Image: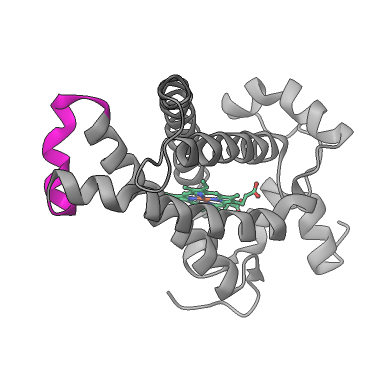
Amino acid sequence: MRRNPRDLQRYTASERANHWVVGICFILLALSGLAFFHPAFFPLTQLFGGGPWTRILHPYVGLVMEAFFVIMALRFWRLNVIERRDVEWLRNVRKMVDGDDHAMPEQGKYNGGQKVLFWGLVIGMLLLLATGLLMWRAWWTPPVDVVRAASVVHAVAAVWMIGLIIMHVYAAIWTRGTIRAMLYGTVTRAWAKQHHRGWYRKMTGDNS
Ligand code: HEM
């Protein structure tokens, strides 16, 4: 895509690479995890070299995703601290969904919805990691009841995460001009002014 010199930089190349490692691992984990979850999804194991290979690879891909997620969360957590204006934004979210976003309180780099999603992802990631490690019997042998409880929580956390990521991707597509932020790193000034006016003012010094 041709870059307009007036566009604003939203993500560095390293932040984008970090995000996409997490995103690609997440898709691989969802596909392999679903294959363990129900026989109807078992054919998905073909993507990973069959049942045993899927079983071997899934936890390692999980560790890669967790490690890169920790780096991403350390980079972004400060920008996701929930403020008063975010609560106000969340109260009015219905209006925005109905297309009337002019009365919404001004937002910084992320809006209230993105921030809630961020902390929802952090909780899901912690649960997946803790329960995944507990049931990784290639390395240790916890009591069977612990493995059983961990697998239930792991499945619930996975459904939670898949739901959140569906919302995340939907919102990114629905808000036109957002996907390119994670592809090329830049957004237009008009996009920034409309969706994240506080961030726009900070980046440009334009207080109009
Ligand atoms: C695979 C499909 C995905 C797509 C198409 C996608 C798309 C995007 C886009 C376009 C942004 C920029 C939003 C903005 O700057 O306003 C973004 C930000 C972000 N994404 Fe994704 N993403 C995907 C998967 C994931 C996954 C799997 C995770 C983590 C589990 C994730 C976590 C994040 C985080 C933490 C941010 C920064 C927003 C914030 O901190 O609130 N994404 N994503």
For the image, the number of numbered tags is: 0
In front of the other: 26 or 128: 128
Residue at 81% x, 37% y: name it: 82
Q: Position of residue 126 (x, y in %)?
A: 59, 39
Q: Is residue 78 left or right of residue 59?
A: right
Measured as percent of width and height from the top left, residue 116 is found at: 68, 33
Left or right: residue 28 compared with residue 70: left
For the point 40% across and 48% down, the residue is 139
Q: Vertical placement of 104 versus 56: above or below? A: above
Residue 127's place in the image compared with 32, above or below, is: above
Magenta-colored stretch includes residue 45: yes
Q: Is residue 106 left or right of residue 17?
A: right
From the viewer's perspective, is residue 43 above or below residue 203? above
Looking at this view, is 16 or 39 the one in front?
39
Question: Does the magenta stretch mainly form a helix, a strand or a loop?
Answer: helix
Residue 69 inside the magenta-drawn segment: no
Q: In which quarter of the image is the N terminus?
A: bottom left
Q: In which quarter of the image is the C terminus?
A: bottom right
Task: Give the residue at x 80% y 27%.
Answer: 87
* Residue 159: quarter of image: top left
Q: Which residue shows up at 27% across the image and 42% down it?
A: 32
Q: Position of residue 191 (x, y in %)?
A: 62, 54
Q: What range is drawn magenta here?
A: 37-49
Instruction: Measuring from the top left, give residue 144's x and y in whole percent.
Output: 40, 23
Locate residue 41 relative to residue 75 in the image: left or right: left
- Looking at this view, is 61 or 145 the one in front? 145
- Image quarter of residue 140: top left
Rendered image quadrant of residue 117: top right
